[in-house]
Image (spheres, rainbow, N blue to C red):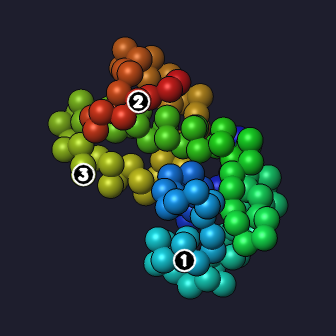
Amino acid sequence: MKTITKKERDCLIMIKEFKNSVFPVRLKDLSGMMNIKPPSVLEILNRLEEKGLIKKDRGMIALTIDGEEEYKRIVTVHRTLEVLYSRSGIDADEACKKIGNFDFLVDYDDAKKISNALGNPKKCPHGKEIQV
């Protein structure tokens, strides 16, 4: 597992979940979605590329195989923690918001242990699949 920042996590998720025609996401798209200036996005992309999580080609950006795996880990951790929070009485939307501030710091193996303790839920409170 690579160590990433919150902005890098946000960028990975946006690259993976970008849905706009047949073209991969571009710097301009990410800048708008993340509400930060293109030079700052480029800096984030360069760090992700150094970590082997993305590839840039003629202005288009895509996840590498390692980037796809990191995305899956992030989503699994996030959704597992959503289940934990919601079962503890925290509103699902509020849980999602709070967890988004730290999910990228939680170890995937720890999330698997939490999932096991929760009975290995198959879906998060929002109905999205959890793949542990």
| Quadrant of the rendered image containing residue 57 | bottom right
Q: How many angstroms separate mark 3 from mark 2 (CA)? A: 19 Å
Residue type at mark 2? Answer: Glu
Q: Position of residue 41 (x, y in %)?
A: 62, 75
Residue under the point 69% across and 62% down: 61
Of residues 84 and 25, the one drawn nearer to the viewer in this rendering: 25
Q: Which residue is mark 1?
A: 31
Q: Is residue 84 left or right of residue 11?
A: left
Of residues 13 and 78, the one drawn nearer to the viewer in this rendering: 13
Q: Position of residue 38 (x, y in %)?
A: 61, 83
Q: Position of residue 5 (x, y in %)?
A: 60, 60
Of residues 103 and 38, the one drawn nearer to the viewer in this rendering: 38
Residue type at mark 1? Answer: Ser
Q: How many angstroms separate mark 3 from mark 1 (CA)? A: 26 Å
Depicted 120 relative to depicted 14: above or below: above
Q: How many angstroms separate mark 2 from mark 1 (CA)? A: 28 Å
Residue type at mark 3? Answer: Glu
Q: Is residue 45 left or right of residue 90?
A: right
Q: Which residue is mark 2?
A: 129
Q: Which residue is mark 3?
A: 94
Residue under the point 38% across and 21% down: 122
Residue under the point 37% across and 14% down: 119
Q: How many C-alpha atoms fall within 10 Å of the one at disc 1: few (<14), some, or many (≥20)?
A: some
- Mark earlier in primary sequence (3, 2): 3
- Mark earlier in primary sequence (3, 1): 1
Regarding residue 50, the answer to whether it shows in the image is yes
Q: Position of residue 59 (x, y in %)?
A: 73, 72
